[in-house]
Image (cartoon, rainbow, N blue to C red):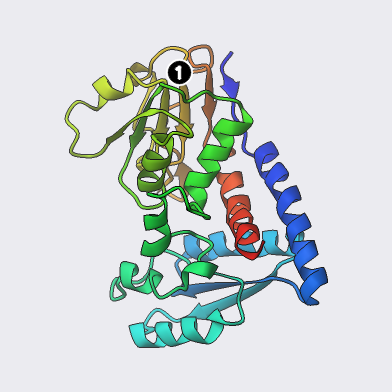
Amino acid sequence: MSKILYGKPVAENLDIQSKDIFKDYASKHDKLPRLTAITVGDNPASLMYVSVKEKKAQELGVEFNWIKLNEGTSESELQETILENSSSSQGMIIQLPLPQHLEIEKIIDLIPSDIDVDGLTSFNLGKLYSDNFNVIPATSFAILELLSHYQIDTEDKNIVIAGRSRLVTSPLSKILSSKQYNANVTVIHSRTSNQKEFISNADIFISGVGKSKLFDRSYFKENSYVIDVGISVIDGKSYGDIDISDLDNYLSGRAPYPGGVGPITVSGLYSNLAKLIS
């Protein structure tokens, strides 16, 4: 039977390490480390994600400063909010997506790189191309931790990543092809005409497309690993990218949605905060 790669034990290990660092910080500075989260508008998914992060902060001993701005907040108002809270925060996130009138790249780069716990500023993403990086975007970090925890070998393995994003594809493709992991990495996307050809040769397939049940058993190499990080919502229900029918005795292992990478992602965010204050 295919091994199910659950994220909970991975997240628990990360939380233990982070909690010790936060406790030590509080002892030395006589205050809790502070994470500021900024939301713009009332996107239900965004509010749900931030509420999960708030709950985790309470568990780990982090002060959570949630700033809720209205949908029509201007770029200058958002910039002022970021500047006002930067000096008093050890970490800061701006929950995506933002309203269309706000330029994501420009807004993210307003966050000082030394409190960018998402690792999404141009500076921190650029540092991934050196050996001197400190934080990895949380979803990418979560996938790397999952591979490590379940001792999934990447040396000279064919890894295919589906989707194009700064959260997953860009960091992962760079890091997995580095000397630390030595994988052979291929990125496919909506304009890739022969997707099945690439995926069927993958020892490890990572999907972050966000389209319900896009890939089924016919795509996958027998005894490969499949990691599902795609999320789509249909009629109020959320789905991953992978159709899990007939996969139980076909794969070596799979990280499901939900319960796979997701639980690690929030813990990964706080692991990044722990690195920034260490």
Q: Is residue 139 left or right of residue 24?
A: left
Task: Give the vertical position of 56 relative to 108 (above or below).
Answer: above
Task: Give the vertical position of 199 relative to 176 (above or below).
Answer: above
Foreground residue among 26 and 92: 26
User: Could you say which quadrant of the image residue 192 lies in?
Assistant: top left
The residue singled out by tag 1 in the image is 224
In percent of width and height, residue 263 lies at: 61, 45
Q: Residue at x 59, y 13 (%)?
A: 1
Q: Residue at x 41, y 20 (%)?
A: 203
Q: Residue at x 37, y 39 (%)?
A: 173
Amino acid bearing label 1: Ser
In percent of width and height, residue 261 lies at: 54, 40
Judging from the image, what secondary structure is the residue with disc 1 in? Answer: loop
Q: Residue at x 22, y 39 (%)?
A: 190
Q: Residues within 10 Å of mark 1 (few under 14, many from 20)?
A: many
User: Could you say which quadrant of the image residue 74 lies in?
Assistant: bottom left
- In this orientation, does residue 258 appear? no
- In this orientation, does residue 138 appear? yes
Q: Is residue 170 left or right of residue 245?
A: left
Task: Give the vertical position of 248 relative to 184 (above or below).
Answer: above
In percent of width and height, residue 246 lies at: 47, 16
Foreground residue among 171 and 103: 171
Task: Give the residue at the far front of this rendering.
Answer: 131
